[in-house]
Image: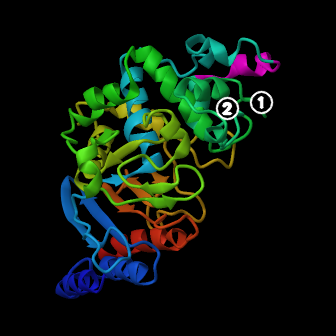
Amino acid sequence: MDAIKSEANSRAEKTSAGQFAKVYKVLQDAIDSGAFPGCAFGVLAGADVVLSDALGGFTFEEDSQAVEAKTVFDVASLTKVVATTALAMVLLQRAELHLDMPVGELLPGFVIGRTSSELARRVTMRHLLAHNSGLPGYVEFFRRETTASALLRACLALPIEATPGERFEYSDPGFILLGKALEILNRESLSAAARKEIFEPLGMSATCYRPARPRWSSIPPTEIDEAFRQRRIQGEVQDENAWVLDGVAGHAGVFSNVPDLLKFTADVLAGSKGKSEIFGRSTVELFTERQSPAGSSRALGWDTPSTESSAGRYFSQRSVGHLGFSGCSLWIDLDASIAAVLLTNRTWPDRKSQAIRQVRPTFHNAIRESL
């Protein structure tokens, strides 16, 4: 690790008089304090990539492989925007998805056979995207369900805990169901649809679900799982529910890198100006508008800055983004035409550290101050 630190310090010293010296210092300090062993990061300003780099290593060991700007990470819940929400945007533009379509029309098992069928009938695709469906936030399905079909059945049978539209609760089960509903609409798997409709058109060649085994060693490990799989998790999705779902789900499962995610943010920004071939301006405006209830920071699939936002102090209220449990984040300021991507494996070797919560806003503040 000393060699990696020396290389990182040398890189930071070279840029100490440069534009992004504050950014390098924030991230190097985070590595030195053990917030995460390494990171890749990038900044888009206008249509230009003005920063794309990396610091640290895959793990805290001295002989750890160094992280590079192109290193692929498990991006966890960034899946919700770069795959699931993005696909929903495309299908809406084709009039194949209607936001107020009841979920039960696509997934009959969501309504049939449950005691709370009246509330379930009222849940729409819009509710799933806005995290106000009334579904619970997180359920450890993996502790009792061992197959993808069994986990899906358990998800379909979850109780509706609040009237749809009246309560915000960030819900992984909601996005599991959303991903499955989009598969029904699109008549193909979520991984195939995301590749065909989003990743390939944008040239996101490193982005995928379920990386091939030969690629695993080039992906930073996320944790030593002593509670469920009893092994080092590297190249496989960290999220246990997504793993039971064979690595392809609406809430998690995508692996990507900084160059690819900057291409994605660039196209969202282009869409907001009516210059994207994938996302129309009206679609971007619709999906980035805050949803009910009052007080929720959620748009459709996207998050927006809250009072103490991970995007820091300077991203405008017309910004959208998302976080990933593994330590990743993506924020886009639609007014300033700026985007920032940070990829880490902050859960290595376990999930105890919460230092990423302080690093993220400080990182984004440093970017905006540097610009």
Residue placed furthest toward the right: 115
Q: So how many labels did they put on this image?
A: 2
| Relative to 364, residue 281 above or below | above
| Few, some or many residues within 10 Å of mark 1 (<14, 14–19, 20+) | some
Q: In the rendered image, which quarter contains the N terminus?
A: bottom left
Left or right? Give the position of 50 relative to 336: left
Q: Residue 222 colored magenta?
A: no
According to the image, label 2 marks what residue? 133
Residue 263 can be seen in this image? no
Residue range corresponding to the magenta coloring: 115-124
Q: Residue 117 colored magenta?
A: yes
Give residue 267's quadrant in the image: top left
Left or right? Give the position of 283 relative to 68: right
- Magenta stretch secondary structure, dominant: helix
Q: Amino acid at mark 1?
A: Thr
| Relative to 315, residue 246 above or below | above
Residue 65 can be seen in this image? yes
| x then y, percent, for residue 232 | 44, 58
Give residue 94's quadrant in the image: top left
Q: In the rendered image, which quarter contains the C terminus?
A: bottom left
| x then y, percent, for residue 197 | 28, 27
Q: Are marks 1 and 2 in contact (CB under 8 Å)?
A: no
| x then y, percent, for residue 121 | 71, 16
Precedes in sequence: disc 1 or disc 2: 2
Q: Amino acid at mark 2?
A: Ser
Label ID, residue 163: 1
- Disc 1 and disc 2: Cα gap in Å? 7 Å
| Few, some or many residues within 10 Å of mark 2 (<14, 14–19, 20+) | many
Q: SS of the residue at dot 2?
A: loop
